[in-house]
Image: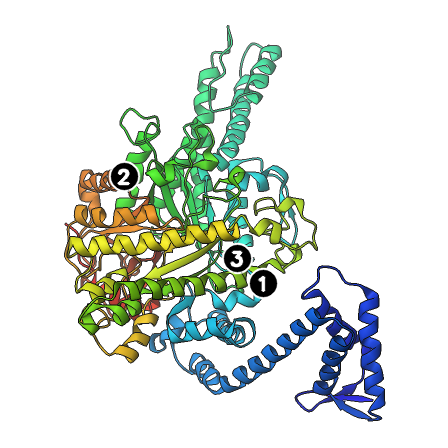
């Protein structure tokens, strides 16, 4: 007998494939499989097939027989699941086929058009859409999104996404079951070494090795996830490497000097070496009647270790801006948090990573990665008498030149609530884009390390504002607005749960680094073929939002930068959303959170759809973008203090992540006290994570770094075939050239006003 496939091909009949289909039907509703149950169904199916006396039979007829046999044998739950699955697959195939023409036109555009002429090829500013691997990613991403919408998403969720009610982020990675991001526990990886899949790397023994393996860990982990990689305690993690190098340098300096000493008291030398081996920080070893050269050896060891550390930090930054991941199309999205380790080893890490950032890359250009985040804390680095205050001053100097580091504030009430003295793993850390993961339904694991976001989906707030607001309707239907918002949130909650269930079906083997190497919290307890559900519960399921300003404009004709009434309503809306995710957390015992959406991939999409639906409406759809999350619109003239004052309360509500920016109009290196005052302003107002933007331009021809208008101040060259590099920030990340921005991001950057 031959089986006729759906595409017309004929293949030999194979009862094993029928058995596998029946087994999947049972496993879809029952945790354990009984062989005798499967045999009963299979035997009936085979009898039905034989009774046809056919030499050829269609795959659909066989599946009909399977469905009928399952029901006839009394397995009603399996029958319902199997029947529903068939109907969904039939619908999915029809959807996929109906979309093929549009899909092929999109792919044709990728192949025939340059990125400058194709907005879709500039969706991710970290990818060169014209490169071979960049195009490969675009082709794969487009096909994967279409497959996801046709075969994996609930039709209601797919329709809501396509209509622009919601945006399911990173949909192209949905079929792989990947998670978004991770705060990498480097200490765990360093203590035993790790396997990248191409070889085993031993535990590092010097600061150079520590820095190299840190970069490799970031690169390896990004291949298992669809988001970014963060090191939450960079100074604490790399400090042991500094100490190892110091001990080696100190012993070498002593031994070298001893060879020129007239006295050959090897006993005293051995005593000093033993004490050096026992050191827990960079300290001088002092013995009675010590060698005269001992202090010089200590000073030499300190200087050599300081130099080694700088070179290690320089190599780390160069690696993260050159090493590729994800088929070679992009460097890893990476961020590092540091600034609170007060040991001399940790201080040396912080100082030198800041100096390496300040120096820049090979031609002294600003490094795009890693996103550096300096953690600010009273009693540690914020006040002049604090042990790391000099490093806070240095961080401001470097940020004024390079736009990094950004600043996180451990003492913000919503961050301080988790802080435990002496446990740096409870110090708040952020992903570079703004994601924040700290609270946990498992209270014993309320830490930043080994955890990350699982997935997130954003709600189109301006659309709800237009439907229920005063701008289009003459009055504000407040009850209608909040009822509609609740429905959207419930819809997103169900979509996130569906995606979570899909992720939980994956095995450890599907994540060879993230979980198989123990980077994710608790994953070391799993076997290679175990499901990952028991450990993914430590991650977050996040609901985001965009365009609060435009939503308020549609509701009551003013945004929160313009009126106190709008600010009060904005806080009411976001508070309501936070309360809803808290309810979801209690109901499902999973970590639901609310994020102020980073609008990298979403910028421009919602407004383009809404413009087609509602037309061009002043103050709402009349630009190419909606305002990022809860921000005061970039085009609205407001001073720095008022902007931060307006945005600060939203940080406390958005437990899944947030960021606030200030835009400066010149080179802040010329006025460091003013720069530091803005950072202090952020802390005192209760900002959780903040950054200061300012122009960073570079002439790649003559190497000039500074503000460039139309003519390079150094060589007098006008912008032409070789454009000036203009470093700008989007969502927390920097991007080196404006031609990588999509149209919406270009428009948003163009509209930004400066905050006096």
Q: On the image, numbered disc 1 is attached to which residue?
A: 502
Q: Is 258 left, or right, of 108 in this rendering? A: right
Cα distance in 3D space between marks 2 and 3:
31 Å
Mark 2 or mark 1, which is nearer to you? 1
Q: Residues within 10 Å of mark 2 (few under 14, many from 20)?
A: many
Query: What residue is at 42 percent from the left and 72 percent from the top?
Result: 160
Q: Earlier in the sequence, mark 2 or mark 3?
A: 3
Q: Is residue 747 above or below residue 702?
A: below
Residue 509 at what x, y percent from top left? 66, 56
Report the colour scheme: rainbow
The reply to whether callout 2 and callout 1 are in contact (CB within 8 Å) is: no
Quarter containing the N terminus? bottom right
Residue at 18% x, 43% y: name it: 670
- 3 or 1: tag closer to the N-terminus: 3
Residue 683 tag number? 2
Left or right: residue 483 compared with residue 7: left
Q: Which label is found at residue 179?
A: 3
Cα gap from disc 2 to disc 1, whole angstroms? 40 Å
Which of the marked residues, 2 or 1, is nearer the chain's N terminus? 1
Dot 3 surroundings within 10 Å: few (below 14), some, or many (20 or more)? many
The answer to whether residue 209 shows anywhere in this view is no
Q: Provide residue 50's location: percent of width, then percent of height.
A: 85, 87
Q: Helix, strand, or loop for circle 2? A: helix
Residue 87: x percent and y percent?
61, 80
Q: Is residue 469 above or below residue 209?
A: below
Instruction: Using the numbered discs, state the Cα–Cα distance from disc 3 to disc 1 in whole angstroms.
Output: 11 Å
- Looking at the image, the residue that sits furthest to the top is 289
Question: Which labelled disc corresponds to residue 61?
Answer: none
Q: Is residue 755 left or right of residue 26?
A: left
């Amino acid at each position: 007998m031959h089986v006729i496939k759906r595409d017309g091909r004929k293949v030999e009949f194979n009862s094993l494939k029928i058995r596998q289909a029946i087994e999947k039907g049972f496993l879809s509703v029952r945790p354990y499989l009984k062989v005798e149950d499967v045999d009963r169904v299979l035997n009936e199916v085979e009898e039905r097939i034989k009774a046809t006396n056919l030499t050829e039979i269609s795959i659909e007829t066989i599946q009909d027989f399977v469905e009928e046999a399952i029901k006839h044998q009394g397995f009603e739950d399996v029958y319902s699941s199997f029947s529903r699955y068939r109907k969904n697959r039939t619908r999915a195939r029809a959807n996929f086929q109906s979309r093929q023409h549009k899909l092929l036109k999109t792919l044709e555009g990728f192949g025939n058009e340059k990125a400058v002429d194709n907005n879709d090829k500039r969706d991710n500013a970290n990818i060169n859409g014209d490169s071979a691997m960049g195009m490969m990613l675009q082709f794969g991403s487009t096909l994967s999104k279409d497959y996801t919408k046709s075969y994996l998403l609930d039709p209601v969720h797919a329709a809501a996404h396509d209509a622009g009610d919601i945006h399911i982020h990173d949909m192209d990675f949905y079929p792989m079951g990947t998670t978004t991001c991770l705060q990498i526990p480097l200490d765990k990886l360093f203590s035993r070494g790790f396997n990248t899949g191409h070889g085993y790397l031993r535990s590092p023994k010097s600061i150079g090795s520590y820095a190299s393996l840190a970069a490799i860990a970031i690169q390896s982990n990004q291949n298992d996830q669809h988001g970014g990689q963060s090191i939450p305690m960079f100074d604490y993690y790399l400090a042991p490497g500094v100490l190892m190098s110091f001990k080696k340098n100190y012993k070498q300096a002593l031994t070298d000097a001893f060879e020129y000493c007239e006295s050959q008291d090897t006993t005293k030398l051995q005593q000093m070496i033993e004490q050096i081996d026992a050191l827990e920080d960079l300290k001088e070893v002092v013995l009675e009647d010590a060698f005269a050269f001992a202090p010089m050896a200590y000073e030499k060891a300190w200087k050599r270790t300081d130099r080694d550390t700088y070179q290690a930090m320089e190599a780390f930054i160069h690696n993260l801006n050159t090493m590729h991941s994800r088929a070679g199309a992009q460097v890893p999205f990476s961020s590092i948090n540091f600034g609170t380790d007060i040991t001399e080893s940790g201080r040396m890490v912080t100082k030198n990573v800041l100096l390496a950032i300040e120096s820049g890359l090979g031609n002294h250009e600003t490094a795009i990665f890693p996103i550096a985040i300096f953690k600010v804390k009273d009693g540690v680095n914020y006040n002049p008498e604090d042990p790391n205050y000099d490093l806070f001053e240095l961080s401001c100097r470097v940020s004024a030149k390079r736009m990094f580091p950004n600043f996180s504030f451990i003492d913000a009430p919503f961050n301080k609530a988790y802080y435990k003295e002496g446990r740096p793993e409870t110090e708040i850390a952020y992903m570079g884009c703004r994601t924040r993961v700290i609270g946990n339904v498992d209270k014993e694991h309320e830490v930043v390390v080994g955890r990350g976001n699982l997935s997130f989906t954003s709600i189109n707030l301006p659309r709800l504002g237009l439907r229920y607001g005063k701008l289009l309707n003459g009055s504000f239907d407040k009850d209608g607005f909040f009822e509609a918002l609740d429905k959207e949130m419930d819809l997103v909650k169900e979509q996130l749960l569906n995606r979570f269930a899909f992720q939980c079906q994956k095995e450890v083997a599907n994540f060879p680094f993230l979980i198989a190497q123990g980077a994710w919290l608790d994953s070391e307890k799993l076997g290679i073929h175990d499901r990952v559900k028991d450990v993914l519960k430590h991650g977050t399921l996040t609901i985001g939002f965009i365009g609060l300003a435009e939503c308020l404009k549609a509701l009551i004709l003013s945004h929160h930068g313009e009126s106190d009434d709008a600010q009060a309503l904005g806080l009411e809306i976001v508070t309501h959303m936070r309360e809803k995710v808290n309810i979801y957390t209690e109901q499902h015992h999973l970590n639901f959170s609310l994020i102020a959406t980073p609008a990298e991939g979403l910028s421009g999409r919602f407004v383009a759809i809404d413009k087609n639906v509602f037309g061009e409406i002043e103050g709402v759809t009349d630009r190419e973008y909606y305002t990022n999350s809860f921000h005061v619109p970039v085009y609205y003239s407001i001073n720095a203090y008022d902007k931060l004052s307006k945005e600060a309360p939203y940080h406390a509500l958005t437990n899944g992540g947030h960021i606030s920016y200030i835009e400066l109009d010149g080179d802040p290196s010329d006025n460091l006290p003013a720069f530091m005052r803005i950072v202090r302003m952020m802390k005192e107002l209760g900002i959780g994570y903040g950054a200061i933007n300012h122009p960073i331009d570079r002439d790649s021809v003559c190497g000039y770094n500074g503000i460039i208008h139309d003519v390079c101040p150094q060589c007098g060259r006008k912008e032409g075939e070789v454009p000036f590099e203009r470093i700008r920030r989007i969502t927390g990340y920097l991007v080196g050239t404006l031609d990588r921005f999509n149209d919406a991001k270009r428009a948003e950057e163009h509209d930004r006003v400066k905050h006096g």
